[in-house]
Image (cartoon, helix red, strand yellow):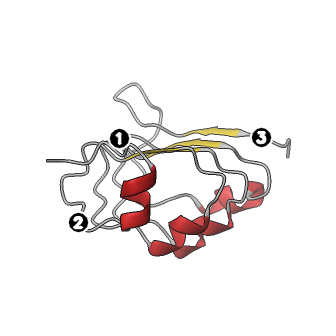
Amino acid sequence: VPVTNNLHLAWSSASDWEPLPKVPYQLWKFSDTVTHVYLDHNEIKELPQRMCSLRSLKVLTLEGNKLTNIPYSMCLITSLEKLELRDNTGLFDPPYHMVDSYELGLPA
């Protein structure tokens, strides 16, 4: 399996798969190397606590999913530069540190 820095699983009507209901478990194979993860427009309802193991993650986009909260363990990803959460209308109470540190694009 080749090492990758980018994981593009943003769903669109042209995709060859159904929207993802959760973060794919295969992501953990690249926990030391992945820097960009694009999971926009899927049906992800929650992020696993294990997300904090993505030590090199710089960009995480989750626009247009069904997230209701963000685990506080996400604050442990010190390399994170961009977190995109727009259009997760059920999102409630993201960690304050993350709201303060990132331009999140939270629903009004």
Q: Residue 92, labelled with which disc?
A: 2
Q: Furthest residue to the left?
A: 108
Tell me the kind of residue under disc 3.
Answer: Thr
Left or right relative to 36: residue 103: left
Q: Residue at x 19, y 47 (%)?
A: 107
Tell me the kind of residue under disc 1.
Answer: His
Which residue is labeled 3 in the image? 4
Tell me the kind of residue under disc 2.
Answer: Phe
- Which label sits in the foreground, 2 or 1? 2
Q: Residue at x 67, y 60 (%)?
A: 54
Dots 3 and 1: beta carbons under 8 Å?
no
Q: CA distance from mark 2 to mark 1?
A: 18 Å
Q: Position of residue 83 (x, y in %)?
A: 46, 47
Q: Which residue is nearer to you in this view: 85 or 99?
A: 99
Which residue is labeled 1 in the image? 41
Q: Position of residue 57 (x, y in %)?
A: 65, 50
